[in-house]
Amino acid sequence: MREPKFFNMRNFLYLAVILFTTLQLKAQKKVDSSVVEEEAINAYADSLRGAMKYKTGLVTLSAGDAQLNVPAGFKFLGKEQSQFIIEKIYGNPPQIAAEALGMIFPEKSDILTENSYVFIVKYEDVGFIKDDDAEHMNYDDLKKQIIEDEVKTNEERKKNGYRTIHLIDWAQKPFYDKEHKVLHWAKELQVGEQPSDNNTLNYEVRILGKKGILSLDAVCSMSELPLVKADIDKVLKMATFTEGNAYADFDPKVDKVAAWTIGGLIAGKVLAKVGFFAVILKYLAVIWKFLVVAAMAVIGFIRKKILGKKDEPSYQITTTEVPDTVSEEIAQDTPPQHPSSEEHKDTPPMV
């Protein structure tokens, strides 16, 4: 994934310079620092939103021999920008962000909308999934198995500096549409050890193909479950495999059979290769706001050392001339540099 220059941690001072150029010093009137901070955050958010390039209609995915037909009422964000948002704005580890092929949003929401959902699109090249066990699955027993397995994965999460994740219950019991080869279910998840009044929701969709599975995973809070349920039928109809790659095109003579079944998909066994990174969380309003506030601290330092100003300047934001650097057209000469997990350890997620 090419990391946009503006948000590269190595170029952090660039953010400070950009913000500095948007500030007009006002000697006549002092502005409360909290007001300026809020305006800076809003300016940054507007610039970030403006850089996103959404699509509708037929979208060919970069992997999985699959495509999406994004109808009116929805919009699709491409691979590069989606990976950036998942890692840098939502605060997920780079390993999980790198798997995203794109994101599906309701038309009236965007990357920073807090009271909405987003579907993360991924593909797993695991082979042909046999669905013989779907009709006989005991989902209560499967839930117990998942809860038992999470003990080990949570140990890994804590070891790597991430908060634990606990399955509370099915938010929507698993359902397999045998005719269309679509499996979907929803989990209510508790993030961290302290109970919450509004837990995280992961609504997971799996479309089976002859070579693997296309995944559409909604991330939001439990309070957005009614929104997801209202739109889920439309979302399920968006994804299809290209000609010759559908489930019915499986040829046992040449195609690989997966080691997992329907139960394994729900239990997360297919995602075992990424271990404790398997759950996507939406950490809105943490990392990007932190960057803005930190950049403003740099501005204060520059003003004091270079301009000889006091720590509490009199200024206001008058423009938001932030270049459109979060763009899929940007090319970089240097390879991407992902931050280590150390950068995320002390950032408290807001789910």
Image (tube, helix red, strand yellow):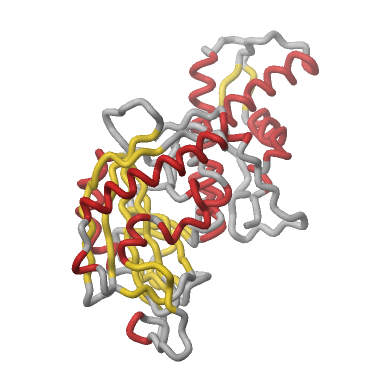
Q: Is residue 328 left or right of residue 245?
A: right
Q: Is residue 112 left or right of residue 222?
A: right
- Residue farthest bottom in this picture: 253
Q: x%, y% of residue 89?
A: 51, 41
| Residue at position x 60%, y 18% in the image | 315
Q: x%, y% of residue 40?
A: 54, 28
Q: x%, y% of residue 289?
A: 52, 30
| Residue at position x 27%, y 60% in the image | 184
Using the image, determine if residue 111 lies above or below residue 192.
Answer: below
**Which of 313 and 192 lies nearest the eye of the viewer?**
192
Q: Residue 56 sits in which quadrant?
A: bottom left
Q: Is residue 43 visible?
A: no
| Residue at position x 45%, y 91% in the image | 253
Quadrant in the picture for the C terminus: top left
Using the image, determine if residue 88 lies above or below residue 95.
Answer: above
Q: x%, y% of residue 292?
A: 58, 29
Q: Is residue 247 visible?
A: yes
- Residue farthest right in this picture: 306
Q: Is residue 228 left or right of residue 321?
A: left
Using the image, determine if residue 162 lies above or below residue 131.
Answer: above
| Residue at position x 69%, y 23% in the image | 298
Query: What is the number of callouts on the image?
Result: 0
**Which of 274 and 238 lies nearest the eye of the viewer?**
274
Quadrant in the picture for the N terminus: bottom right
**Which of 135 and 323 lies nearest the eye of the viewer?**
135
Q: Residue 119 sits in which quadrant?
A: bottom left
